[in-house]
Image (cartoon, rainbow, N blue to C red):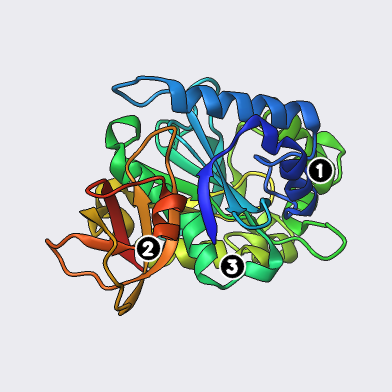
Amino acid sequence: MLVLRPVELTDLPQLQQLARDSLVGVTSLPDDTERLREKILDSCASFEKDVQGQGPENYFFVLENLTTRRLVGCSEVLATAGFGEPFYSLRNRHFTSASRELNIEHGVPALSLCQDLSGHSLLRGFHIDSALERTPFSELLSRARLLFIAAHPERFAEAVITEIVGYSDEQGQSPFWDALGKHFFDLPYVEAERLCGLQSRTFLAELMPQYPIYVPMLSQAAQDCIGRIHPDGQEAFDILEREGFETNSYIDLFDGGPTLYARTSSIRSIAQSQAGTVQTGSPIDARGSYLVSNDSLKGYRAIVAELDYSAGQPIALSAEMCAALNVTDASAIRLIAL
């Protein structure tokens, strides 16, 4: 059985292997021992905190095979983007110019550096073993974060965002970066993303041009990257799109990938998840697949389960499911259909 749980310091060696295998552009998962150690300790502290409002907390989850004790995925949710440092994006919008004498009005799309998305909660760090892509466990890894938000809403913002990794080719070349960022840093795309993972994007973002960049002045290859998803990022996009997330006018400032946005209260796994209580020892006549979680904080757990669920009735769980979720008879749980 696979279970999603908070990361622990003992996960560091396996987590570093996940980082090595992750997609370029997932800067929140750097292949660096000390940086990953800091992230783990920060997450552990976040789960320990008794807070009544959103702050700088970062909740880092891993997906573990309970039989082999092998980690097969990870994901995060940051309570507040831009809490300790600016959260930069590029805003893509039209600038309109007009000539009264010539009776001409013309709109030109332009990219502007901004911090508009600071203050929202941020989903990031999604990575799953390739053998589990397009399975219910991808849904578990992504959506269990949303069930965690549903269980602890006071810790998160009224809106949630995520940045989907933008397009780069098999050699790690990003046409968008080559047309824009490379002129200001003289760094290849892969190296720029690596530096962002090790430090932060702030020091690079602050060297970006402060004036609007007119899109038609970029190469056609770069223009085609605006809002374009890397093929390996498509699943992450599809899962959240089904949750009610939508693209908006913001893109990643390094690779041009799209930003997804949703009001927290309207996200499917938050708005439609059901609370229930555990009933142990009863046979399960499975009629549907569900994501199931407990409502704990540092003891948070979530699994995929085949259940017979009826609203308002206790939910029958097997002994194996109860052990994975760390629950007993009459414990509170939360579930949502796959």
Instruction: Tell me if label 2 and label 1 are in contact, CB under 8 Å.
Output: no
Q: Residue at x 28, y 50 (%)?
A: 333
- Between disc 2 and disc 1, the foreground one is 2
Is residue 173 rendered to the left or right of residue 220?
right
Instruction: Tell me if label 1 and label 3 are in contact, CB under 8 Å.
Output: no
Residue 116, x across and y down, in percent: 44, 35
Q: Within 10 Å of the Cα at label 1, are there few (<14), some (14-19), or many (20+) other Cα atoms?
A: some
Q: Within 10 Å of the Cα at label 3, are there few (<14), some (14-19), or many (20+) other Cα atoms?
A: some
Q: Is residue 185 above or below residue 64?
A: above
Given the current orientation, which residue lies at the most extreme left position?
312
Q: Within 10 Å of the Cα at label 2, are there few (<14), some (14-19), or many (20+) other Cα atoms?
A: some
Q: Is residue 95 above or below residue 173?
A: above
Q: Residue at x 51, y 22 (%)?
A: 45
Query: Of the residues shown, which amino acid type is indicated by label 1?
Result: Lys
Secondary element at tag 1: helix
Q: Residue at x 36, y 57 (%)?
A: 292
In primary-sequence order, the first of circles 2 and 1 is: 1
Return the residue at label 1. 182
Residue 318 is labelled as 2
The answer, for residue 202, to whether it is visible in the render is no
Query: Of the residues shown, which amino acid type is indicated by label 2?
Result: Ser
**Front one among 157 and 308:** 308
- Between disc 1 and disc 3, the foreground one is 3
Structural distance between the alpha carbons of marks 2 and 1? 55 Å
Return the residue at label 3. 234
Query: Of the residues shown, which amino acid type is indicated by label 3?
Result: Gln
Is residue 39 rendered to the left or right of residue 154?
right
Secondary element at tag 2: loop
Query: Where is residue 101, by image quadrant?
Result: bottom left
In primary-sequence order, the first of circles 3 and 2 is: 3
